[in-house]
Image (cartoon, rainbow, N blue to C red):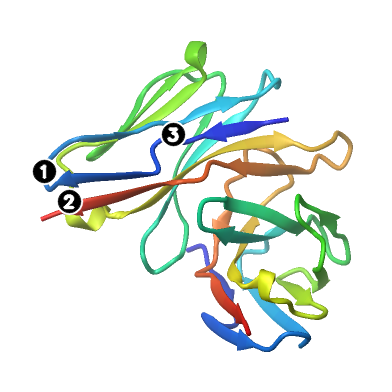
Amino acid sequence: DVKVTQSSRYLVKRTGEKVFLECVQDMDHENMFWYRQDPGLGLRLIYFSYDVKMKEKGDIPEGYSVSREKKERFSLILESASTNQTSMYLCASSLLVREEETQYFGPGTRLLVL
Amino acid sequence: AQKVTQAQTEISVVEKEDVTLDCVYETRDTTYYLFWYKQPPSGELVFLIRRNSFDEQNEISGRYSWNFQKSTSSFNFTITASQVVDSAVYFCALSETLYSGAGSYQLTFGKGTKLSVIP
């Protein structure tokens, strides 16, 4: 069974803090993704990774960085959190690097930056 | 650039009614893939269906059915005899190959349709 987990369901941080969001998948998937979801804007891709230590920018990478040191783990980092990064963050993974591959999502992390 | 439009922002229906969620897409690719996801109040996106551009057969899975019309670039989703548990946000998505070689791709999502099923 497909399983993507995220380290926190809810997170409250202060402006300027460094924030780490962790995502783990146990399916030996090659691809991993980070999205943010905002009302009226749908899901927007922040970064993705198709292999260990590889990363590619998505549509809205500004203010974020990522790390993939192990195949199963993909971290999203907010170097200096700002209030406009308050959002729902969703991690996803897919088996292979092919456009027909289904992405499987984690439960999401609701981040509030004060 | 690809685009996915879900024109219905919110829909409310009474339980047992049928409801259709619309999805219209734009792409220059000749081969592409379309997806539907369900996001219940808990927040996790749940995969419902994947359809490739060469397969225009309609698909039925229990109370769910999907109508893919390549001529009108639409991939609509119908729930028959809706139930309260169907209340969720539904997203349509289109898969796009970013570049050749590495073969990376990404999903372009519509903005979602919030379905409320009233008992």
Instruction: Name the quarter where the N terminus of chain B is drawn.
Output: top right
A18 over A5 or under it: above or below: below
Where disc 2 sits, the SS reads loop
- The disc at residue B83 is 2
Q: Is residue A4 left or right of residue B118?
A: right
- Please tell me how crowded label 3 is: few (under 14), some (14-19), or many (20+) other residues with Cα within 10 Å: some
Residue A88 lies in what quarter of the image?
A: bottom right
Residue B80 lies in what quarter of the image?
A: top left
CB under 8 Å between discs 2 and 1: yes
Instruction: Name the quarter where the C terminus of chain B is drawn.
Output: bottom left
Residue behind mark 3: B7
Please state which amino acid type lies under the numbered disc 1: Lys
Q: Is residue B24 left or right of residue B79?
A: right
Per the model, the C-alpha gap separating discs 1 and 3 is 23 Å
Per the model, the C-alpha gap separating discs 3 and 2 is 22 Å
Q: Please state the horizontal and vertical placement of residue B81, each as a whole percent of the image.
A: 14, 40
Pick whichever of labels 2 and 1 is earlier in the sequence. 1
Residue behind mark 1: B16
Q: Is residue A30 visible?
A: no
A3 over B24 or under it: above or below: below
On whether disc 3 and disc 2 are found on a single subunit, the reply is: yes
